[in-house]
Image (tube, rainbow, N blue to C red):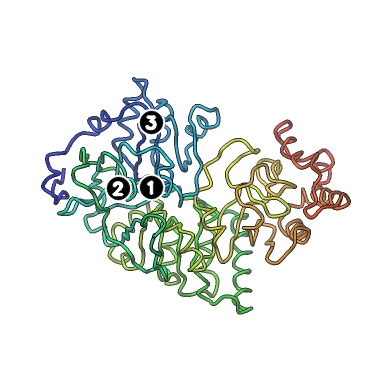
């Protein structure tokens, strides 16, 4: 069991099974667990609780950093083990439960969960489950591949269960920078003045009296899917690279740009990977997640340093990182998510934020979370933390999707607003890039229509805008038609009207 990973003698008598740990849960408890975008999550205790809940009438409120890996969220959802879930998820089974009302979901800015807990705006934490690679001689936790909200959970929970993951190499340390902001109204500043500034400790401080059990695990993180870029993602990436090159040429940026942030997924990875094609050097990152593309840029010598809250990579990248960790430990840092996503730091460093939209409208309002206005997809994540405070707030998405381009992702009006036009500077689809800086709503609309809309829909959306302008208004709309594209999709399986289909 590699008991030598426990250097604090008082914990060695607390080794228990995952089933014994899961037996501590009671109905309607609030449980906080480590885990951020499938990294550093509970791999033993929560699955054991799902098995228990499948045979009992018991459900908990579960708070994490972000999404959990493997099938944990699915297993919990199928077992009706979740009463409430926050702040982010990506699981299809849980998503269905959320959308049919079986599980209550609180969609939060990822920087806010720790704040809400600390300010007692959420119920107190009964149990915290935290993954560790080892425990130091004072009983403190050396985290694994994510920090997320773990430090706050450990501080506030009545009981702590530690999962020691022996699949993590013993040398996987010295990359964590853990600090918990002070209390209001005399909170200190966060003195992060560059992406590699360290302000905290390499461990999560633990009160040994609160530790109720130690569970050993050996399951690696759930790997990110390896997805190759396609024509659309390549086109989006190329538009952005051209834009950044023009910003450098104009003197607004240097070849090092400013610290980059990118959301998770195929488009984000393609965009970051594309920086190898340009004349960029000494790039840095201040983001939430380190993905394959981050390590690709580090390996190529283009990126000097990357800061985030978790490492979520493919299996091949994960294996390479763990085998060659000593080569990366001076180039990466992991922080709590209320530090990685702190508005104060994002604004100070001048972060360039690149996030993915589900849809956006002709004035630049962005929907990141809901399908046809009501069905939750994943959650807002950290996109709002960065969009509101970034030097440049960029949103990307394909202009169309589904067979025969049945869905347009550029619309007269979004069906749900996560990011208002006031927080959006640049919009990009495979068709082009709309630079919205310094533009009034009517100017923004023309930029978006001319550059971002798919040709199948351009005539229809131009007609909408022209007729709305005839009616007048600072932000012209035809309210009786604003959601007609969504309604047409719900009723007919396509956003195209008969005339649109005939012209495409």
Foreground pick, 445 / 267: 445
36 shown above or below 297: above
Residue 379 left/right relative to 398: left
The percent position of residue 82, horizontal first and vertical second, equals 42, 30
Q: Residues within 10 Å of mark 1 (few under 14, many from 20)?
A: some
Mark 1 or mark 2, whichever is nearer to me: 1
Residue that mark 2 sits on: 155
Residue that mark 1 sits on: 118
Residue 469 left/right relative to 115: right
Residue that mark 3 sits on: 60
The quadrant holding residue 1 is top left
Q: Are marks 1 and 2 in contact (CB under 8 Å)?
A: yes
Secondary structure at badge 3 equals strand
Mark 3 or mark 2, whichever is nearer to me: 2
The percent position of residue 391, horizontal first and vertical second, equals 56, 66
Q: How far apart are marks 3 and 2 (CA)?
A: 20 Å
The percent position of residue 260, horizontal first and vertical second, equals 50, 64
Precedes in sequence: disc 1 or disc 3:
3
Q: Identify which residue is drawn at 34% across, 42% down.
A: 33
Q: Residues within 10 Å of mark 3 (few under 14, many from 20)?
A: many
The quadrant holding residue 479 is top right
The percent position of residue 336, horizontal first and vertical second, equals 37, 55
Secondary structure at badge 2 equals helix
Precedes in sequence: disc 3 or disc 2:
3
């Amino acid at each position: 069991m590699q008991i030598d990973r426990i250097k604090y003698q008082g914990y060695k008598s607390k080794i228990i099974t995952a089933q014994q740990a899961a037996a501590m849960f009671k109905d309607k408890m609030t449980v906080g667990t480590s885990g951020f975008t499938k990294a550093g999550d509970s791999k033993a205790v929560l699955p054991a609780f799902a098995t228990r809940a499948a045979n009992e009438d018991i459900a908990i409120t579960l708070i994490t950093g972000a999404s959990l890996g493997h099938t944990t969220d699915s297993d919990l959802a199928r077992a009706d083990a979740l009463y409430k879930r926050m702040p982010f998820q990506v699981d299809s089974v849980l998503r269905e439960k959320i959308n049919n009302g079986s599980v209550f979901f609180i969609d939060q800015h990822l920087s806010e969960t720790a704040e809400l807990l600390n300010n007692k705006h959420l119920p107190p934490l009964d149990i915290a489950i935290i993954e560790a690679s080892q425990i130091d001689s004072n009983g403190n936790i050396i985290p694994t591949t994510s920090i997320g909200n773990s430090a706050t959970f450990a501080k506030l929970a009545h009981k702590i269960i530690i999962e020691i993951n022996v699949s993590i190499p013993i040398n996987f340390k010295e990359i964590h920078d853990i600090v918990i902001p002070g209390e209001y109204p005399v909170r200190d500043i966060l003195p992060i003045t560059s992406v590699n500034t360290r302000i905290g400790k390499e461990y999560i401080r633990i009160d040994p009296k609160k530790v109720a059990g130690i569970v050993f695990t050996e399951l690696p993180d759930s790997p990110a899917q390896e997805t190759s870029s396609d024509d659309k993602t390549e086109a989006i990436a190329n538009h952005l690279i051209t834009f950044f090159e023009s910003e450098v040429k104009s003197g607004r940026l240097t070849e090092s740009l400013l610290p980059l942030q990118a959301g998770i997924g195929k488009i984000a990875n393609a965009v970051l990977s594309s920086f190898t094609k340009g004349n960029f050097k000494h790039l840095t990152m201040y983001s939430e997640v380190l993905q394959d593309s981050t390590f690709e840029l580090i390996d190529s010598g283009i990126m000097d340093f990357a800061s985030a809250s978790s490492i979520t990579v493919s299996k091949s990248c994960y294996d390479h990182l763990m085998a060659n960790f000593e080569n990366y430990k001076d180039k990466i840092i992991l922080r709590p998510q209320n530090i990685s996503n702190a508005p104060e730091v994002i604004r100070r460093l001048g972060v360039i934020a690149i996030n993915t939209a589900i849809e956006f409208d002709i004035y630049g309002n962005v929907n990141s979370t809901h399908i046809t206005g009501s069905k939750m997809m994943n959650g807002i994540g950290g996109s709002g933390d960065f969009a509101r405070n970034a030097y440049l707030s960029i949103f990307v998405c394909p202009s169309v999707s589904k067979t025969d381009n049945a869905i347009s992702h550029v619309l007269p009006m979004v069906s749900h607003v996560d990011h208002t036009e006031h927080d959006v500077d640049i919009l990009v689809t495979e068709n082009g890039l709309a630079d919205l800086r310094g533009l009034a709503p009517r100017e923004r609309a023309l930029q978006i229509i001319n550059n971002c809309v798919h040709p199948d829909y351009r005539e229809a959306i131009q007609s909408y805008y022209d007729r709305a302008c005839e009616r007048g208004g600072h932000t012209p709309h035809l309210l009786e038609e604003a959601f007609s594209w969504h309604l047409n999709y719900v009723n007919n399986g396509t956003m195209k009207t008969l005339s649109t289909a005939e012209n495409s």
